[in-house]
Amino acid sequence: MDFGLNQIQREIRDLSRSIFKDNVTPEKLASYDEYAMPRFDEDLWSKLAEAGLLSTCIDSDYGGSQFGFMELALLLEEVGRSIAPVPLASHCLSMMGIQKFGEEKIRKKILPEAASGKILLTSAFLEPMNNNPMSAHSTSYVFDGKNYIISGRKQAVPFANQADYILLSAANGEDLVVFIIEPGAAGVSIKPLQVTSFEPQAEICLNEVTVESSQVVAVRDGSTLVKWIFDRMLSLICMHQVGVTDAAMKMSASYTSERTQFGVPVATFQAVGHRMADSYIDIECLRLTSYQAASLLDLEEEADIELQIAKIWAADVGHRLSYSAQHVHGGAGIDRDYPLWRYCLWLRHNEMIVGGSSYHTQQLGNLIASGRGLFS
Amino acid sequence: MKIQFNTEQVKLKKELREYFSEMMTPALKEECERDLGEGGGPLWRTALKQMGRDGWIGMGWDEKWGGKGLTPLEQFIFVEEVMRAGYPFPFLTTESVGPILAEHGSDFLKKTFLPKILSGELIVAIGYSEPSAGTDLASLKTTAIREGDDWIINGQKMWTSLAHFADYTWLAARTNPDADKKHKGISLFLVPNSAPGWSCAPVHTLGGIRTNVTYYDNIRISDAYRVGGLNEGWKLITSQLNRERLSLINFGPCSDLFNQIVKWAITTVLPSGESVIEQSWVQANLAKVRAYIECMKLIVYKQSWAMTEGNLDMADASAAKVYGSEAFIEIYRLLGEVVGYAGLIRNSDEICPQASKIERLYRTASIITFGGGANEIQRDIISAAGLWMPRASR
Ligand SMILES: Cc1cc2nc3c(=O)[nH]c(=O)nc-3n(C[C@H](O)[C@H](O)[C@H](O)COP(=O)(O)OP(=O)(O)OC[C@H]3O[C@@H](n4cnc5c(N)ncnc54)[C@H](O)[C@@H]3O)c2cc1C
């Protein structure tokens, strides 16, 4: 059992932290507020590419740096800490899905360019009113003997308008197939959505989109692939939340140590100190459960129970911390000239995306009712 | 980063589980349950000595003192398993008094006490709290006055748990009433509970657990029974409390209780025809409990790991104590809801075999929120040591 980071993990954390620290400033972030422009810093993106950080989990055969999932997870923590405007999670997970399930031809075509940041990938698995991409589908396909014809609707797709390729799942009865489509293909319409966090997100409507067999990433393993990516997506959301919460907590600790009222720093009021102590405990719980889930996925082990637990904490802690941080700041916490408010947007985003606390509590309850999750 | 046990640790866990399942005969179980997690009965004593002979006491002690020199992680596995088995193991004696004696005691004290602790023959009670000294422990009033080679001890201690069957009391007394700071005038003694002038009266608590008031009326003991430096007792007290804090939060029994309740809820059918677990609120309660216990597990594992690495963070240790003590309360409440009315029945387990246990546990859960260093003090430590926030002077 080892809760520490190894040499490589420390290096990745330190390197990414310093890149984000130098490149993500409140002034830069301000340029994306209210969707003034798409929240995607392409300069920063190429710096990450140069540093080999876009391709942490990709084999060196395709130009990747060939680390494991844990390294990517730690990287996402840093993205969260800085709320950097980069589509790292969706891009990396799509690459990893192709690497693990795609045929060599597809891998060769897409991975090297994606690993170097030349092209951008994203995934479209979620659908309206459904947090579970493995079941109940509103996107379906038929196979006409030569091509696949896809129709339906996908939701919450990050960076759909910026991406060169989209990994997309569609069902035929019980079968789930994952395709690679181009956003500009005939029958694809992308409706941008403006969401809490200012992240570019979209709904994708598919109207009899024709896809060739060569664009199929996984036929037989479609649902395995979707679950494989979705598990990791949950994990990365939690890891991102670890970073966001930690940064917001530290901002609150510093602010209350400086701000004086009644002639003393407000931090010296026990009620304030204790609310921060509770945040500290909350974040420790979130961190440990998130690290645990990531560490299991890193070993390619099953992590259903652990992921649900981590997401419950990510949601609960995100909510609690957001209001604690705002409260102990007083008015400054919500003043748009002070950096906290954008963190609060991300705390909310990570809380709600792919289901909030009650939803995941019920999911975990279902697993327990089916006899899983007993302590060994 | 790898948050899983290695093969040796898994083996140790299994070995312990087997050992304790054999040791916990129905009669011993019954006696332990009767004594409400305190121990002290004849079968409990016999079992402790057997554990001593089998080498299970002092696993983390230095080999020089007859221990096994295992790391805190392995010790933690031990603690988890013995608690899970339902045996009230005398941690305070073996895990905190023992190692501190080994570190700070004179040769005489080490030779007199350590072998007996290791063989399970000697139990020590902790005498810190007094009627007017609780969280502000340094304000204690019990005095020890030097007389030749001896000390004369006078005072009253409150909440001296285990004193009614312990052999000695690890007693904090004021040896310098004129010290410039109140915590600088305190020394520690090992007082035999058989000494003339020692007496004890029971204090009964909400959860049924018995503790004691103990009285010290002109007790005379030799200076050889003083532990550590004169007037330097505070250091020993805080390091003892730090060690104690670590054994307070243990998820072994809780995880077992969770397992049992889940199995019960799956197999038990309500008059309406659906099983207990088919009710969605039951699933939600069990899920919340599962998530709470998972964190408790990770927090204590991380602490044991950090201790093994030699970098236990003060704020994290306090976080573990606050989190664990408050999680227990929620866990008992949520599980109590699942068993329903049965969770109010003291004398029958007809509906659910764990119900009367939950009935009682719920009544005992406050002790460690204020005991073992009140949670308010722990939160003060977290905001100061973990977040570098300034705090008001006390
Ligand atoms: C069952 C049981 C077993 C025990 N066993 C032992 C034992 O074996 N040996 C032993 O020595 N003691 C023992 N204790 C005593 C225990 O350690 C004390 O109860 C504890 O130290 C709290 O002291 P108190 O009860 O006097 O409460 P007080 O100190 O009077 O506290 C009352 C309330 O005030 C709060 N408070 C106090 N100071 C502050 C502050 N600075 N800031 C904010 N809030 C504050 C506390 O958190 C608490 O909520 C035991 C107690 C119980 C109930």
Image (cartoon, rainbow, N blue to C red):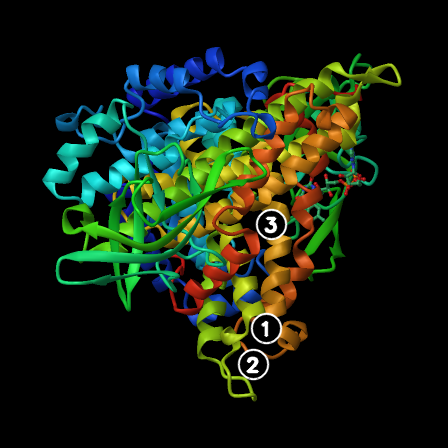
Name the amino acid type tagged 2.
Ile
Whether ligand 1 has any atom under 8 Å from the Cβ at mark 2 is answered as no
- Of helix, strand and loop, which one carries label 2? loop
Residue that numbered label 2 is attached to: B351
For the residue pair A214 and A322, the one nearer the viewer reads as: A214
Name the amino acid type tagged 1.
Val
Residue B311, how many percent across, how many down? 45, 23
A30 lies left or right of B15: right
Q: CA distance from mark 2 to mark 1?
A: 8 Å
For the residue pair B184 and A337, the one nearer the viewer reads as: A337
Name the chain letter of the residue that bears numbered label 1.
B
Residue that numbered label 1 is attached to: B339
Residue A220, how many percent across, how many down? 17, 58
Residue A125, how many percent across, how many down? 37, 50
Name the residue at 29% across, 15% down. Answer: A50
Query: In the rendered image, is residue B301 in sight?
Result: no
- Of helix, strand and loop, which one carries label 1? helix
- Of helix, strand and loop, which one carries label 3? helix
Q: CA distance from mark 1 to mark 3?
A: 19 Å
Residue that numbered label 3 is attached to: B327
Query: In the rendered image, is residue A126 in sight?
Result: yes
Residue B103, placed above or below residue A224:
above
Name the amino acid type tagged 3.
Ala
